[in-house]
Image (spheres, rainbow, N blue to C red):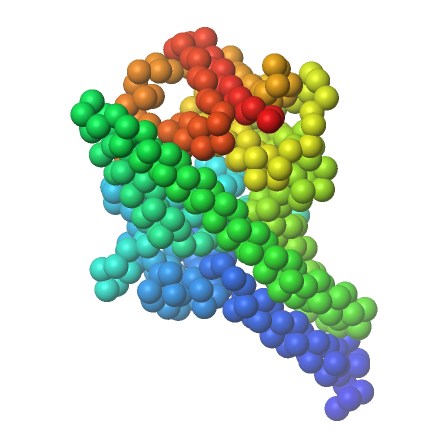
Amino acid sequence: MHRQEQMNGFNASDDSALCESHGDYRTLFDLAPIAVYCCDGSGVIQEYNHRAAQLWGRKPAPGDTDERFCGSFKLYRPDGSYMPHEQCPMGDVLCGKLPGVHDAEVHIERPDGSRVIVIVNIAPLMDEQGEIRGAINCFYDVTERKRMEELLWQSNNALEARVTERTEELTESRQRLRALGAELTVTEQRERQRLAVALHDELAQLLYMIGIKLNLAKQQPMQPPLAKIITEVEEVTNKAMTYTRTLMSQLSPPALSESGLPMALQWLAEQIQQHNLFVSLQVKTEIPTMPEAQALLLLQSSRELLFNCVKHAKTHEATITLEQVDGSLCIQISDQGAGFDLADASKKAHSPTSGFGLLSIRERMLSLGGRFELQSTPGNGTTATLVLPLS
């Protein structure tokens, strides 16, 4: 029997290695600190981890052709409108409408009627011919964070309504509100850092071990079909490792703590290029070292403004200018895109569906004694300026 197995190019050690690798792969999914699932090219769900089932509130059968694009019961857009499964971000990536999805908001309704708000990140999986053969989605729950944003918005509106009769009380309350916004930013960053550490210590290590075991399996004699399967699993593992590293850097940019704000902005510019926006960085003066909390606030605000450019400016070029002017650090982000009406933008900034947009950036800067300036004209581009006193 052993001789016959060798004649067929396969032996029991191959089967054992493959089973062990598959077991590690399942462990990887189940231990991931965020929800993960993958679909084939037609959108059929292939695998998902325990966290995904928790957020969905159900356990779809993997491979069921009636379960496509997402395992949730129902989906909704941030504005509350119903979203058919085929129109969800996973569907847009699989059909080639989007090259990938970064930090998109989706509302999930569970079978029991409860809802959760999640942030999704989706990357396509390509075959050797460059065709999309599937995609992987990593998402996490931000329901509590959105609730805090809603409370922040409601508090701000209530305080604005009282400005004419109780000016002094309003001023004190706005200071507390800004402190809450700054605290929320710090809390969010701590959570991002926690997730990044968990990804590095658990997910990345498991992927690395799977890669080693797959490489050992490839060195064994085996039948061509099995060799092809192992090669395909190895490719998926390598892509998952690449995507994990990208997600780790997005959650907690290493360049900020290691090299300072200018290098972190350069890293951000390179990341944004993945979204078809070429960003050039101009550092006009020497930039002093600043507290990491302040540098993080400037980096996050710059990221928000650049993604606004990606979504709305209808242009493929933008510029970041970094300089020190009159004792203050200034970051200017400009484009020559579509522009917009500032009065209309001000109304939207006070909308409960706007999330952490222009209003949030303004409050973040004010909480540290800085300011946020915005200039835009329809058809003539937009210039946003962040000013933070270095003292």
Residue 249 location in percent, x, y? 62, 45
The mark total stands at 0
* Residue that lies at the very extreme toward the bottom in this rendered image: 1
Q: Write down the quadrant of residue 130 in the picture.
A: top right
Q: Is 193 drawn above or below residue 213 in the view shown?
A: above
Residue 65 location in percent, x, y? 38, 61
Q: Is residue 347 left or right of residue 227?
A: left
Between 326 and 230, which is closer to the camera in this rendering? 326
Could you tell me if residue 90 is visible in this image?
no
Q: Write down the quadrant of residue 11 in the picture.
A: bottom right
| Residue in the picture at 56% in, 24% down | 389
Q: Is 285 drawn above or below residue 63 in the view shown?
A: above
Q: Is the C terminus in the top left, top right, bottom left or bottom right quadrant?
A: top right
| Residue in the picture at 62% in, 15% down | 325
Q: Is 112 drawn above or below residue 70 in the view shown?
A: below
Q: Is residue 200 left or right of residue 195?
A: right
Residue 174 location in percent, x, y? 33, 33
Between 351 and 261, which is closer to the camera in this rendering? 261
Residue 4 location in percent, x, y? 77, 85
| Residue in the picture at 44% in, 17% down | 374
Between 19 and 8, which is closer to the camera in this rendering? 19
| Residue in the picture at 29% in, 43% down | 151
Q: Is the N terminus in the top left, top right, bottom left or bottom right quadrant?
A: bottom right
Could you tell me if residue 194 is visible in this image?
yes
